[in-house]
Amino acid sequence: MIESRAPAPPGVPPPGTGAGGGQARLPVRQGTGRFLVLTCVFVCAACGLVYELELVALASYLVGDSVTQASVVLSVMVFAMGVGSLAAKRLRWHAAAGFGAIEAALALIGGCSAMAMYAVFAWTGDWGGMWKDGPSCVLVAFSLAIGGLIGAEVPLLMELIQRVRRQDAGGAVADLFAADYVGALVGGLAFPFLLLPWLGQVTGALLTGAVNVVAGAALALGLFRKDLRHRCRWCLLLVNVLVLALLATAAVLADDFERQARRAVYGADVRVVLRTGDREVVLTGGTRGRPLALFLDGRLRFSGRDERRYHEALVHPAMNGTHARVLVLDGGEGLATREVLRYPDVRRVDVAGADPGVVRLARSDPALAALNGDAYDDARVHVRTADAFAWLRGAPPAAYDVVVASLSDPGITADAKLYSQEFYGMVRKVLAPGGRLVVHAGPAKSRPRVFWTVDATLRAAGLWTAPYRVGGRASAFVSGPDRTSGASRAPRDWGFLLASAEGRPMPDVPETLPGGLRALTRGALTAGIRQAGETRAWDLPPSTLVHPRYAG
C-alpha cells in the first residue's frame, strides 16, 4: 500500500530515521513481530480490565452501593480513555518510547491503586465524597488516571502494528480490537475467579502491575529497541526496573500493610480474618472483656455490646403464635437461631442463605460459639448455605410457621433482591396458615424512606404489616459507609416489619422465657411501635428485581 505523508514538522524526525514513523527495524520476522504486538495488546487489555474491576470492587466494599460505584468508575474511565487517546496523538512519532513510558506509569498507578485507596480509607476514614453518599475524589482521581493511560495505549499500538507491516486501516483496527477484547475477557474472568479469592485486592493489583510493566518493557525495549535512541533505551530500562522494584517491594510488604490497615479500621483487637469467596470476614474482640464484633466486607454485622437487643427485637415478636417450624434467612453467625431455640416447643429450624465461612466460624470460634449458645450443635438446626433466593424457589409451600429475615440492610445493593416484591412473594408461599415473617428494614428514624419502601414492598406482595423500632447501636465504632462521616451518621435505631398473609399481626413478646429477656420488654416494644409510626412516608412504590428502590 502506497502512503503519502506531509513533511515532518520542525523538530520531528521524518519517517524511517529510527525515531519512529517508518517501517520498524525488528530483530524478528514481520509475522513474528506482528504476533508479539498483538500478544502485548492482549496482556495490556487484561491488565486494564483488572484495574477497572479492582476499583469497582474496592469502592463497593469500602464505600457501599455497588451500582453507584460501578457507574462512576466505568463512566469516568471511558471519558478518560477518550482524552488519553487524543493526547497520545502527539506521541505517535515516538510510539515505542511513548508506549513504554505509558505502560510503566499505568503499572505503577494501577498496581498501587488498591493499596493507596485502602490506606486513605484506613488512616483517614474519609473518602472525600463529592456529594452526600456520593463517589469519592480518590476514586474519581484513580479512574481518571488509569482510564487516560489505557486510552493512550490504543493509538500508539496502532502505530506500532503498522510499522511492523503496513496494511489497510480497517484490517489493522480489526486485529487490534480482537486481541484487545479477548484480553479483556481473560482479565475480567481472572479477577473474580483467580486474583480476588487467591491473592486479594492489594496483592492481586500489584501482580497485575508487574505483568503490565513487563509486557510494556518487552515490546518497547525488546521488539522495537532499534527504534529507540541509546539514551532513551537506558532511561526506559531504568524507569521500568524502578517500577518493578517498587511493585515487588509493595508486594513483600502487603501482608504487613493489610494487618496495620485492619488495625486502623477495626481497632487493635482483630482476632480472625478470613476470606470466603469474594467476601472478607473479620472478627474482633471476644477476649479480656472486650465485646465481640463481626464485620462482613467492612460492615458491622453485630457488636456484642448490643446484639442481644437487636436479635431479641428481631425474633421474639414473630414468635407470638405457632412456631414449631422456623426458617432463618442468612444469620450465619447463629445469634437469631439462638433466640429461636429459647422456645422449647420449636421442632425444626432451617438456616438458609448463610455464608458457609461465617457458619464455620460460628461453630469453631470459642467466643462466637459461646455467644450464640452453641446453636449449631442443636439437633433441631439444619443449615442450607445455598443462595436464599434460589433456595426459596424450590422450598415446599406452607412449610414454616415463622420466617426470620436476618439480613444485612436493604441499602446494600448486593442484598437488594432479598428485599424485593418477588422475594417476599416466595416467602409468602412458604408460610403456613397464620404464619409470620419478620424483616430487618434498616433504621426507621434516620432512613424512613428506605424503611417504608420495604413496608410498601411487603404489602405489594400481599402481606399485612406491623412496623416497630428499637433503639440500639451502643457501639462507638462505626464501619463501612457510616464511617466516612464519623459516628454522627451511625444509625441509632433498628427498624423491623412484622408481616402476615392473614390480617395485620400484633408485635408482642412473652413475659418470661428460659434464661429471661434481658434487653427487650413489652413497654419498649409498645413505644417502638408508636415511634415507627411517627416516621411514616406515604405513597412509596414497591421495590422489584427489575426496579430496585434502595440503591443510592
Image (tube, grey):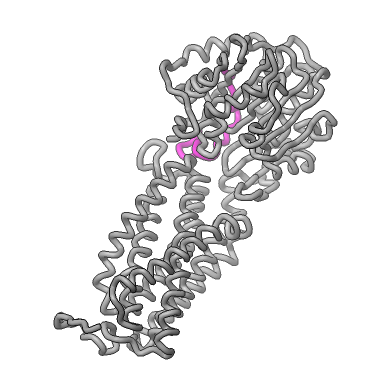
Answer above or below: position of 140 versus 64.
Answer: below
Is-magenta flag for residue 481?
A: yes
In the image, residue 420 sits, relative to residue 507, either above or below, namely below
Q: How many labels does the image show?
A: 0
Which x, y percent locates residue 393?
64, 32
Residue at 64 percent of width and 20 percent of height: 437
The picture quadrant where one finds residue 359 is top right
**Quadrant location of residue 240?**
bottom left
Would you say 300 lies left or right of 324 here? left
Residue range (magenta) = 469-487
Task: Tell me if 123 is positioned left or right of 288 in this view.
Answer: left
Q: Which of 417 and 256 is in front in this view?
A: 417
Residue at screen point 42% across, 89% down: 29
- x and y percentages locating residue 208 in the rendered image: 51, 65
Instruction: Name the residue: 49% across, 48% down.
Output: 121
Of residues 397 and 133, the one drawn nearer to the viewer in this rendering = 397
On whether residue 371 falls in the magenta region, the answer is: no
- Decide if residue 190 is on the left or right side of residue 103: right
Looking at the rendered image, the quarter that the N terminus falls into is: bottom left
User: Residue 18's spot in the image, x, y percent?
Assistant: 29, 88
Quick check: can you spot residue 309?
no
Q: Position of residue 436 (x, y in %)?
A: 66, 17
* Quadrant of the drawing holding the C terminus: top left
Residue at point 34%, 68% (across, down): 154
